[in-house]
Image (cartoon, grey):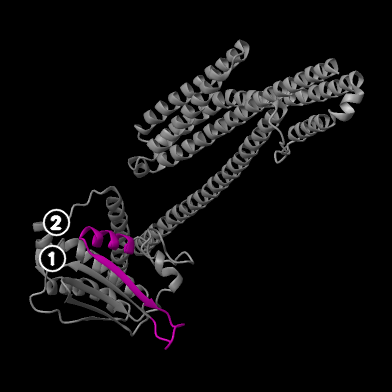
Amino acid sequence: MALLLAVAVLVTAASTAMLVTTLGAANVQVDRLVNAQNRLELLSGISGRIGDYAVVALRSAHDPQLRQQGAMTAVRRAVQSSFQRFENALGADVGRMGDEEQRTLMAARSRTVARLRAQFEVLDRQIETAFLRPDPADGVRVALDVFAAGFGAPLGQAMEDERVAAHEAQSAVAQLRDRTLRWGLSGVLIAFLVAVFVYQRLGRSLVHRVADVATAASALSQGRTDTRLTVTGHDELSLAMARFNRMAAQLARREARLVAAQRTLQEIVDARTAELRAANTRLESVDLARRRFFTDVSHELRTPLTVILGEAEITLRGAHPPEDELRAALITIQNRARRLHRRVEDLLRIARSESGQIELERSLFPVRDLMEEVRESMSPLARGAGLSLVLAEAQEGLLLNADRDWLRQTLDGLVANAIRHSSAGSSIRIDAAGEQGAIVLRVCDSGSGIPAEELPHVFERFWRGAAGGREGTGFGIGLALAKWIVDRHGGQIEIESKTGREEGGQSGTCVTVRLPSPETDICLEAAQ
């Protein structure tokens, strides 16, 4: 009996030791699998950050203001941080390995990542050098193409190495499961043959517990991490079962974290994809506006030139053209030349406003004199269109501290817009008043009005309405230039408009310009 008990104890101890060893080996392989998955996610993160870097570099090549805002610095730090996290994780994994061969393989992967990081640093220097050139876009694209040609294959190989490592860990767990089942069955068979009677009376519960452990290990190897064992004693087998439960709980938590990380990664990828699509849409809109602008420029410049040439040719055909016909032709040529001159001046002003070459020359002058100049310069155009230009009586002593020429040209442009969009027989009103520490200038008409859906776009450059404008309506730069001038003076410009479709059937547009009064300017300068 003592011998049988000793054999039973030895067999039990051997089975328990085997189980603990198996569970320990399974834990090691699971750790390898988790570490490989973690490194694979870090490599994917590196790929995503480099993709973000490429997108920001291309946008910064076309938008110098984006470079000044530090966008390149932020994405560069993100890429370097991704490389650093991968190297830290790889170093920690190497430190936990006891096998010299595995440590050598991990060191080789570290060298591969170091080469990838060096390639990125070379790319970063090349892009910074390209930004110093007058046209950095081509240099940035060439640098990115060269980088992609040499970076993709090593990165893909590194990710494939991590997938292979994960697959090997899974295979090792499967083999360990098979060996555990075989050894468990062999132990049960030996124990059954040695002491059938004793095991019938004393070892039944032990056999059931070992069978439970084997079943749980098989379930765990199949991915059912919610498997748990019922621990009823305090012996070695019970301790092993408790450790098994803790290991299963750890695996369940790790699996949950992996699923959450994968979901987050997918959300990030979807968000970046949506941002790229929105950016492409904006770029297409800008390109369409530019192409339409150049088409309109060609048409607007060609039309008056055609009229000028035609009038000159017709006048020169006759040997002695009558003085009336000659004068009419010269007047037509003069009007078309002035119109062409205004178009060219508009283009020059918009170009200077974009480059910041315009400097305001402020002076103190009466508002009434400014309004008189506007009426004098725009009255011929209004009479030619069959309109009346009404100038409200300005308040006495109303002064402005501003650039008189630019402000006059701004009001001329607003009046010209009102003339173009008003019907014959109507009137255009210009008035000025002092309101709450500001000088308010208004140009109002009773023309066709601006649809409500187009009002948010009227100050955009090259905007000529949803239908693209019509011949003779300008390039869509007048209001944009007016807003730029008013902003430079520290003021505000607003537009109120309604069409005949609204209540009452009335239509018209009123443009309001608010400029700081001279007293406000003095207070601001004193505060500065």
Quarter-of-image position of residue 440: bottom left
Q: Is residue 517 left or right of residue 469?
A: left
In the displayed orientation, state which residue is furthest to the front: 1
Q: Disc 2 marks which amino acid?
A: Glu
Is any part of residue 322 visible from this angle? no
Residue at x 44%, y 42% (from the top left corner): 59
The first of marks 2 and 1 along the sequence is 2
Give the residue at mark 1. Answer: 520
Q: Disc 1 marks which amino acid?
A: Thr
- Compared with 403, 371 (above or below) is below
Residue at x 32%, y 41% (from the top left corner): 68
Q: Is residue 517 left or right of residue 293?
A: left
Residue 448: x percent and y percent? 40, 78
Residue 117: x percent and y percent? 48, 24
SS class, disc 1: helix
- Magenta stretch contains residue 486: yes
Mark 2 or 1, which is nearer the eye? 1
Q: Crowding at label 1, few (<14), some or many (≥20) Cα neighbours within 10 Å?
A: some
Quarter-of-image position of residue 233: top right
Residues under numbered marks 2 and 1 in contact, where contact means CB atoms less than 8 Å apart: no
Q: Is residue 199 left or right of residue 398?
A: right
Residue at x 53%, y 17% (from the top left corner): 111
Which residue is more in the foreground, 408 or 103? 103
- Magenta stretch contains residue 483: yes
Give the residue at mark 2. Answer: 361
In the displayed orientation, state which residue is furthest to the bottom: 504
**Magenta segment:** 478-507
Point out which mark residue 339 bears: none
